[in-house]
Image (cartoon, grey):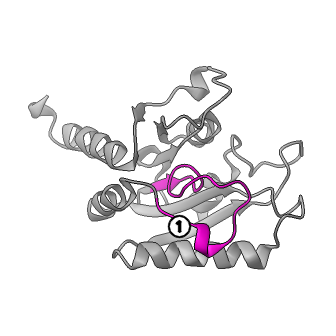
Amino acid sequence: NKAIFLDKDGTLVEDVPYNIDPERISLLPGVIRGLSALQHAGFMLVLITNQSGIVLGYFTEPELRNALEHLRDLLAAQDIHLTASYYCPHAPDIQSCDCRKPQPGLLLRAARELDLDLQNSWMIGDILDDVEAGRRAGCHTVLIDNGNETEWLRSDLRTPDITAKDLAAAAASILRIKTLHAHPSSI
């Protein structure tokens, strides 16, 4: 099984800090077209998100699960189905946490639980921590370059395979690469 691991805020939905209000959750342009194409190509869609608002007291886990269910419903209304959602509730400064991106813990957990082939999977996100998490897990990576990355701390682990303006462009690039690998004579 292969998957598309997806960051939530700034990749799938408007980045509204610590938002769990379903009324304020809106899909970004290109999300439906991109996810539909990837799902049609046989990828499982798996949400991977840092949610430190829990430990910081901005919202509770049940409130987050309600917001994630609303996101799942928004996508399902367009015939797009999230296979699973994983979140890290820890603060950025917790040294013992292996699940907060850029650590790969959530991707590795998903791979075990969903029997995923990480080498044929992709991590898509809007900051280089997403890219690093994907690379650490052994995935291919896409950076949605929409202005959300502010640090630009570069390294081999923080260099995406693809940079795209939105999820539709990311999907098109992934599927083009997949086609080239499936049919090398067309190169």
Of the 4 image quadrants, the one containing the N terminus is bottom left
Q: Is 137 placed above or below 50 here?
A: above
In the shown orientation, is residue 36 left or right of residue 88? left
Three-letter code for the amino acid on which mark 1 is drawn: Leu
Q: Nearer the viewer, residue 152 or 132?
A: 152
Q: Which residue is mark 1?
A: 114
Q: Position of residue 173 (x, y in %)?
A: 30, 39
Our reading of the magenta stretch's main secondary structure is loop
Looking at the rendered structure, the number of numbered marks drawn on it comes to 1
Horizontal and vertical percent position of residue 87? 69, 61
Foreground of the two, 25 or 138: 25
Q: Name the residue: 36% across, 60% down.
A: 35
Q: Is residue 114 magenta?
A: no
As rendered, which of 56 and 95 lies closer to the eye? 56
Does 10 appear in magenta? Answer: yes
State whether residue 116 is above or below residue 167. below
Residue at 35% over, 53% down:
30
Q: Quadrant of residue 29?
A: bottom left
Quadrant in which the C terminus appears = top left
Name which quarter of the figure residue 84 lies in: bottom right
Q: Determine crowd level at label 1: few under 14, some 14-19, many 20+ residues with C-alpha closer than 10 A.
A: some
The x, y position of residue 32, in whole percent, is 35, 62
Boundaries of the magenta span: 4-27
Single out the residue that lies furthest toward the left. 186
In the picture provided, is 2 more to the left or to the right than 132? left
Establish if 160 lies above or below 114: above
Q: Which secondary structure lies at badge 1? A: helix
